[in-house]
Amino acid sequence: MFRTNFICSLLFFVAVPCFVRAAAGPVSAEGRLTISVEGDSAVEKMEFTVAVPGTISGRQEITALKMSPKPTRQFKQDGNTYAVFTLTAPIRKREIVVDVKGMLYAGSVDAVETGANSKWLEKSGKWAKWLKAEKFLEVDDPQIQKTATKLKGKTEMETLTRINEYVSNSLEKGPFSGADVGALKALEVGQGDCTDFTDVLITLCRACGIPARNASGYLTYIPSDTPKHDRMEAYLKGLGWVRVDPFHTKLGICTLRDSKPNMFVVDHLRTNDTLGGYHFWRYLYWGEGKVKVSSTWTVNGESSAPSKAITGK
């Protein structure tokens, strides 16, 4: 991945001109997820399934992952990494803590090396999954199809640029919401949070024939609203998967071509069946008692405001 300037210069003089874009080095990052649990005496057992950061080739390398209490089991499913925690009575007040350290690599359009992933995907025949309509990504809707037709360019990069500009012009930043509305509703309302911006961009990319997928994770800093974040990855022929962050582009934090390596990715699925359709983690509990669950994300001693979960049983 890292080539010396000497090799490039040698090619310049003995063969043909060689122009390379400087590759950004990896960024060191760390964070702590804390899930706080309260349960009364009638709660018999609780089970948490948590999507945790895993190593993703060319995107992030997890160098340390410490979890307390020890997970009942860990497994991989659909490219994601999960840890299951089982809490038995008495629950009272408990915490699940996940400490992560790792290296985050540049994955933007400007930084991805040509051909890094294209041969693998072309041979694997996995295109269809990232082109289909699914819940919240209404690819086959007539209005989406009509809009996609207008946005198609002569190249995939031109199409992606037009779609990103359309999303930025069509949506304003709205307040953070835990509710999923989908691409169509977001366009109708004309505003949204990072999930809504991402839904619209993925939907229109797929409608234009560009494979696109979700990327959810935790930011490596604490913003004013929530460190939980959604962006997307588009598959461009000759480049492979490139990272695009429509919400941060709208806010001026990055550009289409230079999305920052500022997030631990935990999920590439828009609708995660392993988590029961929820995001980041889910829990079940047994018994007739009441439970109270919240989570925080901490970076360099600064913690986010607690975010509450929907109760499951």
Image (spheres, rainbow, N blue to C red):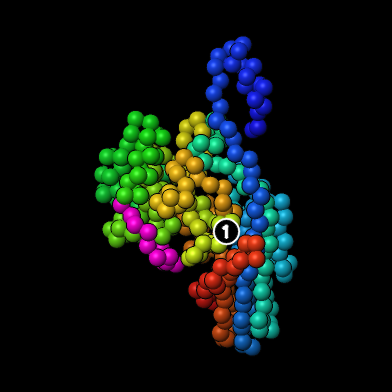
Which residue shows up at 41% across the image and 60% down it?
193
Total numbered labels: 1
Question: Is 171 in the magenta?
Answer: yes
173 to the left or right of 88: left
Residue furthest out toward the top = 14
Please name the residue that numbered disc 1 is placed on. 221
Q: Dot 1: what SS?
A: loop
Name the one closer to the observer, 254 or 46. Answer: 254
> Which region shows up in magenta?
170-180
Q: Main secondary structure of the magenta part?
A: loop
Which residue shows up at 30% across the image and 40% down it?
151
Name the one closer to the observer, 215 or 173. Answer: 173
Q: Is residue 191 above or below residue 103?
A: below
Residue 59 placement (x, y as % from top left): 60, 44
Q: Quadrant of residue 105?
A: top right
Q: What type is the residue that disc 1 sits on?
A: Tyr
Q: Is residue 107 above or below residue 289?
A: above
Question: Is 82 in the magenta?
Answer: no
54 to the left or right of 139: right
Q: Quadrant of the C terminus?
A: bottom right
Q: Quadrant of the N terminus?
A: top right
Residue 278 placement (x, y as % from top left): 50, 64
